[in-house]
Amino acid sequence: MIPNEVIIDLGALRHNFFEIKRLAGPHTQILAVVKSEAYGHGMIPVARTLESSGVDYLGVFEVQEGLDLRKANCKVPILIMMGIQSDEVSDVVKHELAPALFQLEIAEKLSRISVEQGKVTPVHVKVDTGMTRLGVCCEDLKNFLKQLLPLKGIQLQGIFSHLAVADQPGDPFTDQQVGRFRESVGECRRLGLFRGGVHIANSGALLANKGLDLGMARPGILLYGSPPAQGWPAAASFKPVMTFKSRVIHITTVPPGASVSYGRSYITQKKCAIATIPVGYDDGYSRLLSNNGEVLIRGQRMPVVGRVCMNLTMVDVTGVEGVAVGDEVVLLGGQGKEQITAEEIATRIGTINYEVYCSIGKSNRRIYINS
Ligand SMILES: Cc1ncc(COP(=O)(O)O)c(C=O)c1O
């Protein structure tokens, strides 16, 4: 079997969850975002760990994820953050999922089917305060709620919005969005249109203590042990949950002037020992790491040389004492005193840690441990 493993440390996940609770304080509920296979960490094991740790709510993107969680016997309330399509209404009602709502036609169908099934479906109205992505505009919220309230079989449990730049400490747009949100929700409360819970804080807002007083926070990336961007000292107490490991499968010694991999983009300057690792872009290890990445072998950083192939990557191990076929290679995570973080990989390839976790986590066999 190919010796590649993504190791998910559920003990670290639990630690991060309790760090989040500590930061959020006793009056703020936690909606844990476990969409997209829990950012590549595996939605079901992550959800089970969070459920047993006392999470209040789970957030997924689409209905199918909610159904998968219910099938796995997850009992926690589940928010479908994308909203739902007309043909998904029956499943949502039957499996007691809580959809984001911002379209009246969907609300009407949800009401009809809920009444037919003798159920009351919780919903969270989504408000667009500046993402221009999904939701009712702030100005339309009042009217939307007025149309929603007479509908039977629906319980307006929450109103929420999403922040565009909460990962950038000090960007005034976050305060503007939170302010707009408070104002619209406040008006609806004053008019007696709404009495439920409100949430806007993602990981960045949680670290910056913005919008936590609203009663619920919706962190994702912090659960997985990473800050939402560089420059968050408050995230230092969080532990990375994912490690990506492989093994050396071949070592060859080549003279100066040898070319390595497709395109001959790397030419050895001296006699070199080149190790081959069975990891490539098919495993979520980006081709942009060609001549750019580093891996850990025997506790030392070693450079990726030549192009990352679909299934193989070469590393210059010249001068590493005792390096041998079968040696463990860490591509993401720690070995000895060294650590390669998702943030480091993201910086090297010009993306964000979220994408690194999703790509690697979803492309490999995951093994769960409990440190
Ligand atoms: C609607 C919504 N809420 C919360 C989150 C969590 O964001 P973060 O991972 O930055 O905490 C996301 C992530 O994409 C989201 O789409």
Image (cartoon, grey):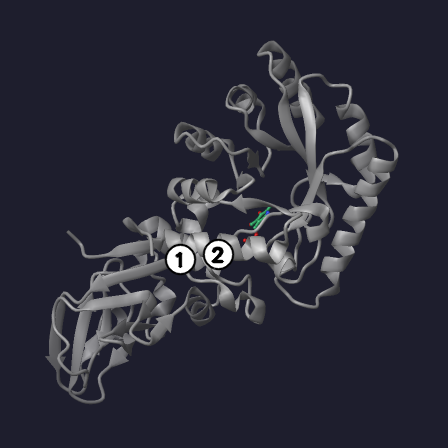
Q: Are marks 2 and 1 in contact (CB under 8 Å)?
A: yes
Extreme residue in the bottom direction: 270
Extreme residue in the top direction: 116
Residue at image location 57% in from the left, 67% down from the top: 234
Query: Residue at label 1?
Result: 241
Q: Is residue 111 visible?
A: yes
Q: Is residue 174 left or right of residue 76?
A: right
Mark 2 element type: helix
Q: Is residue 86 left or right of residue 105?
A: left
Question: Label 2: how many residues lie within 10 Å, few (<14), some (14-19) or many (20+)?
Answer: many
- Nearer to the camera, 109 or 337: 337
What is the quadrant of the C terminus in the image? bottom left
Query: Residue at label 2?
Result: 16
Residue at image location 80% in from the left, 50% down from the top: 180
Residue at image location 76% in from the left, 41% down from the top: 137
Instruction: Quote the CA–CA distance across marks 2 and 1.
Output: 9 Å
Name which of mark 2 and mark 1 comes first in the sequence: 2
Mark 1: amino acid: Val
Q: Is residue 265 visible?
A: no
Question: Label 1: how many residues lie within 10 Å, few (<14), some (14-19) or many (20+)?
Answer: many
Mark 2: amino acid: Asn
Residue 43, how many percent across, how many down? 42, 42
Residue 300, how many percent across, how many down? 27, 78
Mark 2 residue's CB less than 8 Å from ligand 1: no
- Nearer to the camera, 346 or 260: 346
Q: Is residue 247 left or right of residue 18?
A: left
- Nearer to the camera, 332 or 106: 332
Mark 1 element type: loop
